[in-house]
Amino acid sequence: MKVKKIDIGIKGLPESLHDFAAAWKKLESGKEIRKDEGVYFDSIDTMRAVLTNNRLLVLKTIREKHPASVYELAKMLKRDLKNVNQDLRMLAEAGLVTLEKTETDKKRVVPHVDYGKILLEIPV
């Protein structure tokens, strides 16, 4: 089984704008662009603020134990539901977790991690 990965890196505004401009030019000329799976932060401090030890444990627990709800995840982690919700919101905003509302119970949210490995890229 192939492990899906997600790249995490540091990109400043100038590099992000350059990447966007290059992709736009390819689209305008009718060329296909490759979709890269990745999350990029503007600084290592921002990345550290998002990827705390607790949040990395949240990702690992979701990936390994497949909780059926946020409540179940909080019980697995032995953490307060409110704090787990805050961590999930931050991880979802960063694109590291998907949160799915169930059709049978609209209040129930199921967290998903669709990758098995995070690769960190830091330019020097």
Image (cartoon, rainbow, N blue to C red):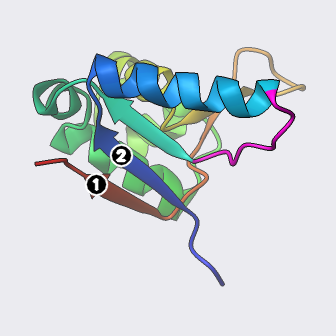
Circle 1: is it few (<14), some (14-19), or many (20+) Cα within 10 Å?
few
Q: Which residue is denoted by mark 1 in the rendering?
A: 120
For the image shown, how many numbered marks are present on the structure?
2
Q: Earlier in the sequence, mark 1 or mark 2?
A: 2
Residue type (three-letter) at the residue carrying disc 1: Leu
Near mark 2 (Cα within 10 A), the count class, few <14, some 14-19 or many ≥20, is some
Q: Residue at x 87, y 34 (%)?
A: 30
Q: Quadrant of residue 24?
A: top right
Could you tell me if residue 67 is visible in this image? yes
Secondary structure under badge 1?
strand
Locate residue 121, reporting x and y percent: 27, 53
Q: Is residue 109 above or below residue 8?
A: above
Q: Is residue 31 magenta?
A: yes
Q: CA distance from mark 1 to mark 2?
A: 5 Å
Image side of residue 90 versus residue 33, left or right: left
**Which stretch appears magenta?**
29-36
Q: Nearer the viewer, residue 72 or 112?
A: 112
Q: Can residue 95 be found in the magenta stretch?
A: no
Task: Say which element carries label 2.
Answer: strand
Residue type, label 2: Ile
Q: What residue is drawn where x is 35% and y is 59%?
A: 119
Vertical relation: 2 (above or below) 4: below
Magenta-colored segment: predominant secondary structure: loop
Q: Nearest the camera: 70 or 42?
A: 42
Which residue is label 2 attached to?
A: 8
Residue 81: quarter of image: top left
- Left/right placement of residue 15 relative to residue 2 reads left
Q: Quadrant of residue 94?
A: top left
Query: In the rendered view, does 78 fall on the left or right side of 112?
Result: left
Residue sitting nearer the eye, 50 or 17: 17
